[in-house]
Amino acid sequence: MQNEQDWENPLEDDGITLGPEEALSREIEKSKRLKVERLKLRDEIEKLKAKNESLAQKNREMKNEIKKLGSESVAQAHSVAFPDSPKSKNHAYFQSWLFFLLIFNLSALGILLYFLLES
């Protein structure tokens, strides 16, 4: 009998006292909702793990591609720095002409400025 006296009646949201059967059914419904929510969260976690793994795989592939492109660019830079083809001779000839034209034009500009300032 002491247990019955210690029993506190749970209140509904609007202040109405519930009986033990109604309180039990409410707790069962709450438990079912929590289980459904837990299952939804597990599904979401599995989806996120799968997405995370796919993104990690893409990241590894991109890093490998960057390394591959980096090694190709180093090889190209090496071939540009140390050319062995006949084009390199033409390129050097072209550069010497460009340097000559630059010096010639700067000299002509200097002479024109000198005569302009003298008059």
Image (cartoon, rainbow, N blue to C red):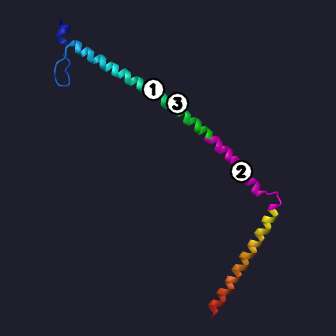
What kind of residue is marked 1?
Asp
Kindly identify the residue that appears in the image at 83 percent across and 60 percent down. 86
**First of labels 3, 1 by sequence position:** 1
Query: Compared with residue 81, is residue 50 higher up or lower down, i.e. above or below?
Result: above
**Residue 85 position in % (x across, y down):** 82, 58
**Residue 115 position in % (x across, y down):** 66, 90
From the image, tell me which residue sits under label 3: 50
Give the structural element (helix, strand or loop) at label 2: helix
**Residue 59 position in % (x across, y down):** 58, 39
- Residue 30, located in which quarter of the rendered image? top left
Kindly identify the residue that appears in the image at 64 percent across and 86 percent down. 113
**First of labels 3, 2 by sequence position:** 3
In space, the residues marked 2 and 1 are separated at their CA atoms by: 46 Å
**Residue 93 position in % (x across, y down):** 80, 68
Kindly identify the residue that appears in the image at 80 percent across and 61 percent down. 87
Q: Viewer-nearest of labels 3 and 2? A: 3
- Density class for disc 2 (Cα within 10 Å; few <14, some 14-19, many ≥20) is few
- Density class for disc 1 (Cα within 10 Å; few <14, some 14-19, many ≥20) is few
Majority secondary structure of magenta residues: helix
What kind of residue is marked 3?
Ala
- Density class for disc 3 (Cα within 10 Å; few <14, some 14-19, many ≥20) is few
Q: Is residue 96 left or right of residue 35?
A: right
What kind of residue is marked 2?
Val
Name the image quarter holding the C terminus: bottom right
Q: Viewer-nearest of labels 2 and 1? A: 1
From the image, tell me which residue sits under label 2: 74
**First of labels 2, 1 by sequence position:** 1
Q: Which residues are magenta?
A: 62-87
Which residue is most to the top?
1
